[in-house]
Image (spheres, rainbow, N blue to C red):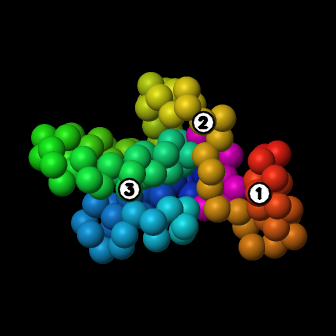
Amino acid sequence: MQQNFEERRLASELVKKTLLGYIPAREALLKFPPDTKDKSVQAAFHALVHFEADEDLRKRDLLYKEEQDEYLETISQILETGEDLPNNIIKNYEIYYKEANLPHADNARGNLNRFFRYLNLD
C-alpha cells in the first residue's frame, strides 16, 4: 500500500505541475511511475495524455479548457490523499485502453517490456 501511496503522490504532483504550467504534459508523462499496476495512477496518466492531445481544442474552446482543468485538478486532489479514484473515472479510460502506456523501468525487465511494446506484443 505504501508503494501505491508514493506513486499516487507523484502522479498528483505531476498533474498539478502540468496544470500550473511548470512542466509540459509530455515531460510529466515521461516521469510517471514506471510499470505501475495501480489503476488510479493509470487513469491519471490517461487523463494527462488527453490533456496533451487536446492542446488545439483547449485553445479554441475556453469552456472545454476550464472543464478539463477542473477534472484534472480533482484527480490530482484525490491522488494527493492516497485515495482510489472513483470507479467511473477509471472505467472511462479502461474502455479504450487495456493498460496505460506508461514508461517502463530502466532495468532488464523494462527493456524487455519496451521490446515487446515495440513488437506490439505488450
Q: Which residue is mark 3?
A: 52
Q: Are marks 2 and 3 in contact (CB under 8 Å)?
A: no
Look at the image and tell me whether residue 3 can be seen: no
Residue 28's place in the image compared with 96, above or below, is: below
Q: Nearer the viewer, mark 1 or mark 3?
A: 1
Residue beneath the point at 46% across and 70% down: 27
User: Which region of the structure is painted magenta?
Assistant: 33-39
Q: CA distance from mark 2 to mark 3?
A: 17 Å
Look at the image and tell me whether residue 15 can be seen: yes
Residue beneath the point at 44% across and 32% down: 89
Relative to 114, 74 lies left or right: left
Q: Quick one: 10 or 117, which is closer to the camera?
A: 117
> Can you tell which mark lies on residue 118?
1
Asked which quadrant contains residue 107, the reply is bottom right
Q: Position of residue 117 (x, y in %)?
A: 76, 53
Secondary structure of the residue carrying numbered label 1: helix
Q: Quick one: 42 or 122, which is closer to the camera?
A: 122
Relative to 32, 1 lies left or right: right
Q: Position of residue 9 (x, y in %)?
A: 47, 59
Q: CA distance from mark 1 to mark 3?
A: 22 Å
Q: Which residue is mark 2?
A: 97
Q: Position of residue 77 (x, y in %)?
A: 34, 49
Secondary structure of the residue carrying numbered label 3: helix
Q: Residues within 10 Å of mark 1 (few under 14, many from 20)?
A: few
Relative to 35, 40 lies left or right: left
Q: Amino acid at mark 2?
A: Tyr
